[in-house]
Amino acid sequence: MTNIRDIARVSGYSVSTVSRVINQKNYVSLQTKLAIQKVIDQLDYVPNAVARNLSRGHTQNVGVVLPHADHPYFTQLVHGIMQAAFKENYHVILLPSMYDAKLERRYLKDLRQKAYDALIFTSHGLPLTELAHYQQYGTIVICENPHDSQLPATYAERQTSYEQAFQYLHEQSADRIGILASRPIEVSATTQAMVQAYQKVFGCDLLAAQIFTGVTTPEDGRRAGAYFLRLQPAITAILTNGDDIAIGVRQAYQRASVTLPYLIGQEHQLSGEAINLPTIDHHFSEVGAQAFQLAFSGQKRQVGIASQFLLSPL
């Protein structure tokens, strides 16, 4: 593979002069530039982008770690990140993790080796303490409430909107509530927030049987609907974790010819608007855009963005 020394040897100019031409520096005559460029073309030389980025101290790359893209939480976050990144001429590299700790550690090691200017964790399997350890090697941003952690973060403030949703159900005398979540309460701050909001509004614990996890797609919603149809006493309302997922639950009840419970979606999707489904909008595109700005600026701030309970999404 041709390198800068080959160009210097063939052209008869010094390595430093060739370097100035390649990097478009001043102090090189037009005649010298043309002579060196002729050799560059003859040898079909292309500068090593990685080496050039390292010499500049940045890569224009931001890595976005996400476990999957099946849920609107992740697709909306990534949309916001990409919109903001493109404005700054940054490349967005999606890094699938499936919550695998080994994969996440590999991405952190890549950050240490300057493969990225920053990493944005849309979610994670590793503890925050381990992520925080790698801040010494580069910028790490998380998309959740950091609580006691000092990690830069941008996140949706969910608690108030969850309480408003449950208050609405309480006012409708819906006293047997089901909750859908992607991950179990032991590992998910989102599931914890929904359960805590329920406890605050209804003043009692939510039974484990009323929480259905592993839900990310409309098909999962149909499975959850079939599950809740079997529970006794009957479920009277369900807080789903996505409008598309709520549609799946709705289909399960309609196929069984059973009266629908009150349904509340999340993420203000077009499917929900089509049936005027009450929903919670967490403004994840804005959360993603703010996450990129923290990654781009290197600021160690924590930005909460208010969510909205929309009784009518139209």
Image (tube, rainbow, N blue to C red):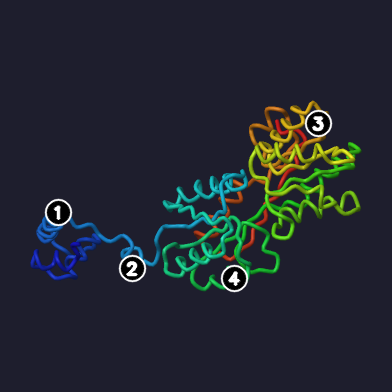
Numbered disc 2: secondary structure: helix
Labelled pair 4, 1 in contact (Cβ < 8 Å): no
Residue at 41% in and 63% down? 115
Numbered badge on residue 41:
1
The part of the image, by quadrant, that contains residue 117 is bottom left
Residue at disc 3, secondary structure? loop
Give the residue type that dot 3 points to: Leu
- Taking depth in this image into account, of 260 and 74 the one nearest to the observer is 260
Q: Which residue is mark 3?
A: 260
Mark 4, Cα crowd under 10 Å, few <14 / some 14-19 / many 20+, is few
Q: Earlier in the sequence, mark 1 or mark 3?
A: 1
Judged left or right of residue 173, residue 215 is left
Marks 2/4 in contact by CB < 8 Å: the verdict is no
Q: CA distance from mark 1 to mark 3?
A: 70 Å
* Disc marking residue 55: 2
Label 1 Cα crowd, 10 Å radius (few <14 / some 14-19 / many 20+): few
Cα separation, mark 4 vs mark 1, equals: 48 Å
Q: Is residue 273 above or below residue 304?
A: above
Q: Callout 2 environment at 10 Å: few (<14), some (14 to 19), or many (20+)? A: few
Say what amino acid the circle numbered 1 marks: Asp
Residues at circles 1 and 3 in contact by the CB criterion of under 8 Å:
no
Q: Which residue is mark 4?
A: 130
